Each structure stands twice: as structure tokens, then as C-alpha cells.
Amino acid sequence: MIRVGIVGFDTSHAVEFTKRINHFNVDSGFWVEGARIVAGYPGEPTPAASQELLDERTEILRNYDVEIVESPLSLIGMVDAVMIEYNEGDKHLEASRPFIEAGLPVFIDKPLACSVQDAKKIFELAEASSVPILSASSLRYALEVQRLKESKDEVGDVLGASTYSPGTIVQFNPGLF
């Protein structure tokens, strides 16, 4: 079983990924096997994430059997991998650095970074430590996208697409929007 830690509860993904990985309040068709979110660090309040929001998500994650730690560095030695879940991409380099340097695989939720310079640095650190890094969007796994893929013969080639989400544009991701 891979023990996973989460850093940053300001995005709903901290809760949603935990539901799927720890098998809480989600259909079994969406379960992720072979891993468990065992610990997490909520982060500090910011203009994008109030203390009230962090407290609410902390309580939810406690109910999903996640141990809450006082410092992100407390996760080192407790977990086998880390998920960086801050909404603000400009935090991702420094948030991921100690885990990469400790040799832990890291998933960095989108955006990977707010600058090419930060993104390159993340991958330089990962290469120097021989650590895998992943950053991706789950939209390609959305049922609607999968259905479209399955009906390619009926639909034909897709030449373009637009998508939307319930998320808001985070003004604290300079340079992205």
C-alpha cells in the first residue's frame, strides 16, 4: 500500500482525491486502489483560502482517516509520496522542493507552476534526485470525454474543444490568465 500525504487543502481536489483513494462517499467505480491518503497539512490561510475553508476541509479529511500534521515537513518519513494541492501555482516549487530532495515522488496539481522558470526548476530538482514528478488534469478521464473517444467512428475527428468547470480563475496565479 502506497502511503500518500497531501499538502494544501485550499482546493477541493484535496477532498475529492481523498474520497477516491480512501474509498469514502464515492461510487466504487471511481475508487483508486493500491494507495491511501494517510496524512495531510492544510496550509495557511491566504486571500484565496480562508481559515474557515481550511478548517472545514481539515475536518472532512479527518473523517476520511487522514492524520493532520502541523508542518508539511512532518510528512517526510510518514509517507511514500506527496500530492501538492495548493491552488496557487506560485507556491508549488517551494512546496514540492523538500519532498523531491527527500526522494519522494510528487504529484503537483495544476498548474504545475506559474512560470517556465519554476517549472524547469521543479524538473531539475526531480532529475537531480531521481524522483518522478506528475502534473495533470483529470478532465481527460471525464465520462463525457471518454464517451466522445468511444464514439470517434460516429463523430469523426475532433478539431477543437471548449470546456468549463465550476472552478474560478485564481487571481493568485500570475501569468497564467
Image (cartoon, helix red, strand yellow):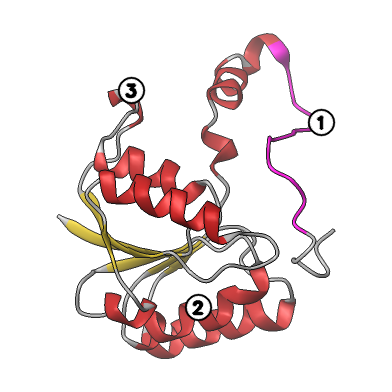
Question: What secondary structure is found at the residue carrying circle 1?
Answer: loop
At label 3, counting other C-alpha atoms closer than 10 Å, the crowd grade (few under 14, some 14-19, many 20 or more) is few
Q: Is residue 34 left or right of residue 25?
A: left
Q: Does residue 61 lie above or below 44 as drawn? A: above
Q: Is residue 113 left or right of residue 31?
A: right
Taking the magenta stretch, the answer to whether it contains residue 95 is no
User: Residue visible at 55% across and 18% down?
Assistant: 150
Disc 3 to disc 1: CB gap under 8 Å: no
Give the magenta part as a residue range: 155-170
At which x and y percent is residue 114? 72, 71
Q: Say which of marks 3 and 1 sits in front.
A: 3
Amino acid type, mark 3: Asp
Name the foreground residue: 141 vs 51.
51
Say which residue label 3 marks.
27
Farthest residue in the top direction?
A: 154
Q: Quadrant of the N terminus?
A: bottom left
Residue 95, numbered circle: 2
Looking at marks 1 and 2 on the same chain, the residue that comes earlier in the sequence is marked by 2
Name the foreground residue: 13 vs 155.
13
Q: Is residue 137 left or right of residue 76?
A: right
Say which residue label 1 marks.
159
- C-alpha gap between disc 1 and disc 2: 37 Å
Question: What secondary structure is found at the residue carrying circle 3?
Answer: loop
User: Residue visible at 40% across and 71% down?
Assistant: 132
Amino acid type, mark 1: Leu
Can you tell which quarter of the image residue 106 is in?
bottom left
Question: What secondary structure is found at the residue carrying circle 2?
Answer: helix
- C-alpha gap between disc 3 and disc 2: 31 Å
Looking at marks 3 and 1 on the same chain, the residue that comes earlier in the sequence is marked by 3
User: Residue visible at 20% across and 58% down?
Assistant: 2
- C-alpha gap between disc 3 and disc 1: 33 Å
